[in-house]
Amino acid sequence: MGPNLTMSASSSKAATTKIVYILYLVGIVMPILTIIGLVMAYINMDDSEEWLQSHYRFQIRTFWIGLLFSTISSLLTLIIIGWPLLIATGLWFIIRCVKGLKFLDQQQTHPNAVTWMTD
């Protein structure tokens, strides 16, 4: 009974991590969901296994870096260059979430959780 309970708790934590990625992606059209995902990542990071902590770290960084890029891009829309930068930021955000989901589905630690780019 012990190993099944541990496996169940681990899969539950992985499911929570996946929900954060999904909230981020849906948050592109409903931004409040991204904030809910951020809060969930902060709450669950410390009491998760190491491989899941790397995903939470990646999700938290994705939010804050994305917010920085979005803010700068929004300010630059006044001089036109911001519009393509906003599109690039959205694509960057989507790529990071999809790559994170890929590593999560393979039950792997995120290899570059602290990078600014999508590697």
Image (cartoon, rainbow, N blue to C red):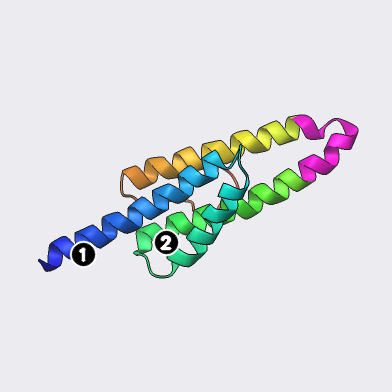
What amino acid does circle 2 point to?
Gln
Q: Are marks 2 and 1 in contact (CB under 8 Å)?
A: no
Residue 72, placed above or below residue 41: above
What amino acid does circle 1 point to?
Thr
**Disc number lying in front (2 or 1):** 1
Of marks 2 and 1, which one's residue comes earlier in the chain?
A: 1
Which mark, residue 6? 1
Please tell me which residue is depicted at 47% across the width and 57% down the height of the picture. 56
Looking at the rendering, which quadrant does residue 117 occupy?
top right
Q: Position of residue 83 (x, y in %)?
A: 78, 31
**What secondary structure is the stretch in magenta mostly built from?**
helix
State the CA–CA distance, disc 2 to disc 1. 17 Å
Q: Position of residue 70 (x, y in %)?
A: 72, 44
Quick check: 59 left or right of 14?
right
Does the stretch in magenta take in 15? no
| Residue closest to the eye, 105 or 16 | 16
Please tell me which residue is depicted at 38% across the width and 58% down the height of the picture. 52
Quick check: 34 left or right of 77?
left
Q: Classify mark 2: residues with Cα within 10 Å, few (<14), some (14-19) or many (20+).
A: many
Residue 96, placed above or below residue 16: above
According to the image, label 2 marks what residue?
53
Looking at the rendering, which quadrant does residue 102 occupy?
top left
Q: Position of residue 17 (x, y in %)?
A: 41, 53
Q: Outermost residue toward the left?
A: 1
Please tell me which residue is depicted at 65% across the width and 51% down the height of the picture. 65
Asked whether residue 18 is in view, the answer is yes
The secondary structure type at the circle numbered 1 is helix
Q: Position of residue 8 (x, y in %)?
A: 22, 58
Magenta residues, start to end: 72-83
Residue 7, placed above or below residue 80: below
Please tell me which residue is depicted at 75% across the width and 29% down the height of the picture. 84
